[in-house]
Image (cartoon, rainbow, N blue to C red):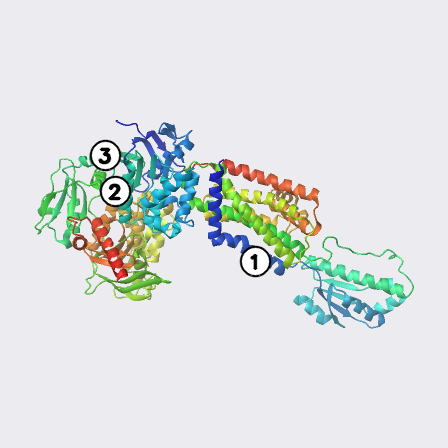
Amino acid sequence: MARESLVNIEGVSKRFKGDDVPALDSIVTTIQPGKVTGLVGPDGAGKTTLIRLITGLMQPDQGSITVKGLSGVKDTEKIHAITGYMPQKFGLYEDLSVIENLHLYADLRQVTGRERGEKFERLLAFTDLERFKPRLAGKLSGGMKQKLGLACALIGDPELLLLDEPSVGVDPISCRELWKMVQELLGGGMGVVWSTAYLDEAEQCDTVILLNEGKMLHDGPPSELLAHVEGRTFQIHGVKAENRRRVLMTTLQQEGVIDGVIQGKHVRVVMGKEKETPALETVAPGETAEWHHVDPWFEDAFIDVLGGGPGGHSELAEHMEEKPDADRPVIEAKGLTKCFGDFTAVHDNTFDIYRGEIFGLLGPNGAGKSTTFKMMCGLLQPTEGKATVTGLDLKTVTSEARNRIGYMAQKFSLYGHLNAQQNLSFFSGLYGLSGNKQRQRIEKMIEIFDLKKQLKHNAGDLPLGFKQRLALACAVMHEPDVLFLDEPTSGVDPITRREFWTHITGMVEKGVTVMVTTHFMDEAEYCDRIGLIYRGENIATGTPDDLKEQAKDVDGALEAPTLKDAFIALVQHSDAERERKGVA
Amino acid sequence: MQARRLKALVVKESLQIMRDPSAILIAFVLPLILLFIFGYGVNLDSNRVKVGLVLQTTGPDVTSLSQAFSNSRFLDVTISHTRAPLEEKLIAGDLRGLIVVPQDFTAEAALGAESAEIQVIADGSEPNIASFVQGYAQGVFHIWLVHQAEDRGRPLRESSITMQERYWYNPELKSRNFLIPGSIAIVMTLIGTLLTALVIAREWERGTMEAMMVTPISIVEILLGKLIPYFLLGLGSMLLCTAIAVFWYEVPFRGGLLALIACTAVFLVAALGQGLLISSATKDQFVASQVAIISAFLPSFMLSGFIFEISAMPQPIQWLTHAVAARYFVTSLQTIFMTGNVWPLLLSCILGMAVVGLFFSVMTMRKTRKRLD
């Protein structure tokens, strides 16, 4: 080791009262100065707990942590003096202005006199917040809050900068800017910890601590982890767009395949060690498909470390009846507009969704996804325009017609104080199931989603993955024709996410129509078509590949854009258009 | 402790107070509403009790007795010559009692005033008012007897000593005069405990407390940074309440401003301390508000002697009231407003509040740490 470690973490364990498993289990690692250390893992992996342990806000049950040789137990005051910390939600006072927030943190950190003025100038220029000095922090966009949070954390010239999920609730563009800023800071020898649940962010980090359920799965440069799956990652090219999900499902059920996802028009596959790719005639019959070697992704490696993803078989879908054909779109939105006072949350949104199609609404937080969604479900009255589902306006239809839809709300909306069994009974009753049929369906759900052990636990106490399964079970128990999913996999680990999509894919094969909102790019890849929502407007609609093509049109520099690149390019283009119109 | 940091925190908190409508609402609008309710809505006064007067006979004595009742400023008299209509009104609750002058009254009175008798019937469903009816009727009758006897030149034998009633401190017996100072104590409990309980819990909920904990700030600074602005806000609110009491409701203010401020200051430390303790322990605005209402607001209503007389409570409950800072504050305020600076009493109240305040401060110091686990 060339340089001395900034933080030493030795055998640290932490268990919270009432939990069966420790939040952190025997973590041994170091954090180096001048580098970005990615603290990566799904929700509940122990990221925040580890950061709080480093700050001394919590004490480990076992093991010890030192920051620059200072003990995390005795010298917390000294540690605080050299640490900058941006907690989740940025830790800003929303009713103070940008400059007042800076003044507060400068005073707390004893930054005074000329040094203070110079530092403010530098930080405001660095974060491009000079223009917004008098604006209340609560009125800033997510991206600007994030920058202000960073500026406040940087005021004391910290040697260690801890950022807890800085990219949550922030659009990809702001996030990319933040990333550039952090890179500039490293030159001075600052050590940065960047925690994230997005595995694609991990690839950019100099080194990565990968956590899952409190255990450390990897500690080292991301390339080391990628090396594990080197030569085992492939794409199947040449599959017809409408068949790619079926091909994926079949592939996942083949011997030796440990993971697979949809990636644009291709199917991405990870093979087990020294396994041969399955024959294309089996997985993609009647297609002119071919195997292509591709570079591994971090998520491939993550799934590999966890021992592979779930298979491609959905028992849920298997038992479902084929949904009848429909000659017209199942879901129609015509000129949907919603105003709250003089604020237009959704402006003139039009799209159709056909039987057996997955339609995604993709966009940053606050773009108007959820508002559009609620209008579709009849939960909000559109100011203008019309939303129909199976030709009916959900606002006015009878409850029988409502029984044809399933709805899974954000954060899963289960009754936290009812146990899993009671939630299933309650929701099945709501959707009009009763008697024998109800009992059989509930039993089936328990079997399919492996809920047996969790039945007597209150839904509020279930691990996130199980909550999500239970919520899906509640939404599909009555075999709806149309399924509305609002941020269905927010925060859940990649394995559960795959399992979820296996079920959705299976159901779509049976003719179920799905509308989903998401801000996960890889999730958007599963969609047949995507509506890109930005500032209340549908700025682009099309298949994921259409969007990538459109992005190439507006930004000539893009060669093989990912969906995220496309997203950023299209949003920036929209901003430029808006500005141009504003000037004209 | 470091002056610059403390100042920064106080400035921050003050800005937040000024920008947050709910703080202003609780500190300055709520007192107006509560004082309005207590000033006009709640009335424990006994004047003008409605009674029926049944005159079953006539004669000059009866006329003069009936005039005596009608002229009383404590009674609102309805006169009838039969019982039935007035009894109906009594049952309907329109009258609080009946005074019956029986048929043989004139004959008895002629024999000698002291042997004359009247009947008083009171509505016992409200014992308090029933006793007023009884007392006033008796008083009026007694005075009439004395006058009668004097007129005839035969003073009453047993009434050679007459009673001259005087009510000290509140000679007009206006309940408003002690309700208003008491309600000020309730308002101050709300501001002190509820507001502080909410604002720290809010910082935990929004994650700002966590960010602040990882600066070189100390616990004392955090707590003082909260205490000082709300202390000043509380004093401001106190002055507003006092002004309303004195200038609008014309409650007498016989004590000194110094005594008022001294008592308020000590009380605020206790109330704010309790609020800080609640929010340090709960870290959740909803729970904090519930706990504040149950542990501070309700006791300040029920156990402070504001409405319910403490000496009338069972002994164990009386002991319990000593832990309620509002109890001392109600007494102090009522004393300062209506009586004056009775320092021995005020000092014992201040001591009581100081002990409660010290308890909460020490508990808060021990409970609040720069730790999350």
Count residues near mark 2 (Cα–Cα under 10 Å), then give few for <14, some for 14-19, many for 20+.
some
Q: Are marks 1 and 2 on the same chain?
A: no
List the residue tagged with mark 2. A201
Label ID, residue B33:
1
Which badge, 2 or 3, is on the more N-terminal residue?
2
- The image quadrant where one finds the C terminus of chain A is bottom left
Type of the residue with mark 3: Pro
Q: In the rendered view, tell whether residue B91 sits above or below residue B25.
A: below
A57 displayed left or right of B63? left
Q: In the rendered view, tell whether residue B233 sits above or below residue A225.
A: below
Label ID, residue A221:
3
Report the residue at 22% width, 52% height from top: A569
Report the residue at 49% width, 50% height from top: B17
Label ID, residue A61:
none
- The secondary element bearing badge 2 is classed as helix
Provide the chain ID for the residue under circle 3.
A
Q: In the rendered view, tell whether residue A460 sits above or below residue A370.
A: above
